[in-house]
Amino acid sequence: MTQIERPNIDEYFLKIASVIAERSTCLRHHVGAVAVRDKHILATGYNGAAAGLKDCLELGCLRDEHEIPSGTRHEICRAIHAEQNVIIQASLHGISLEGATIYCTHTPCILCAKMLTNARIKRFVSFRKYADDTFIQLFEEAGIRADILAKPSTEILHLD
């Protein structure tokens, strides 16, 4: 009998966040997020333009056009961040994120960190650092555990 090593729960949900990121329309970073409570997915989000509007794949990147460095001037961007979209999707479906863990491909910018703090999440798990580390002190003060883990394998293991 073939022995398959199952990913642990953090690897599992980080891998799901990576798949969600494939829907991103950002030309700089593909970011995916999944909100989880009690090992159940509550909502997902990826970075991209507001629903129904033209995105950077079609129009090009405003931030690149203005040579804006990553992690700054968030207001000059068509995209809504993945963490913002996970909060929005949860709210559209009447789902509280209180006590949830957010698994995300990147660490949050300070704006997303503030929103996640007010959403009362308990944990944030990522494998890639964004250019803004100011979330660390905010999360510490709010009692939100932040874990930056190794990038999960991109291999999908299954038996045919």
Image: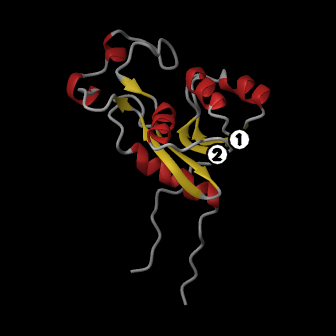
Q: Is residue 63 above or below residue 38?
A: above
| Residue at 72% from the left image edge and 29% from the top image edge | 139
Q: Find out whether the residues at labels 2 and 1 contact each other: C-beta distance under 8 Å.
A: yes
Q: Earlier in the sequence, mark 2 or mark 1?
A: 2
Left or right for 15, reference 38: left
Quadrant of the image occupied by residue 50: top left
Residue 157 image position (x, y, % from top left): 47, 70
**Outermost residue toward the bottom?**
1
Residue 129 image position (x, y, % from top left): 58, 33
Q: Amino acid at mark 1?
A: Lys
| Residue at 38% from the left image edge and 25% from the top image edge | 79
Residue 99: which numbered mark, if any? Answer: none
Secondary structure of the residue carrying numbered label 1: loop
Which quadrant does the C terminus fall into?
bottom left
Q: Amino acid at mark 2?
A: Ala
| Residue at 55% from the left image edge and 90% from the top image edge | 1
How many neighbours does mark 1 have within 10 angstroms: few (below 14), some (14-19), or many (20 or more)?
many
Residue 141 image position (x, y, % from top left): 79, 26
Q: Nearer the viewer, residue 96 or 22?
A: 96
Q: CA distance from mark 2 to mark 1?
A: 6 Å
Residue 78 image position (x, y, % from top left): 34, 21
How many neighbours does mark 2 have within 10 angstroms: few (below 14), some (14-19), or many (20 or more)?
many
Pointer 2: what residue? 100
Pointer 1: what residue? 122
Quadrant of the image occupied by residue 55: top left
Q: How is the image coloured?
A: secondary structure
Left or right for 23, reference 118: left
| Residue at 62% from the left image edge and 48% from the top image edge | 150
Secondary structure of the residue carrying numbered label 2: loop
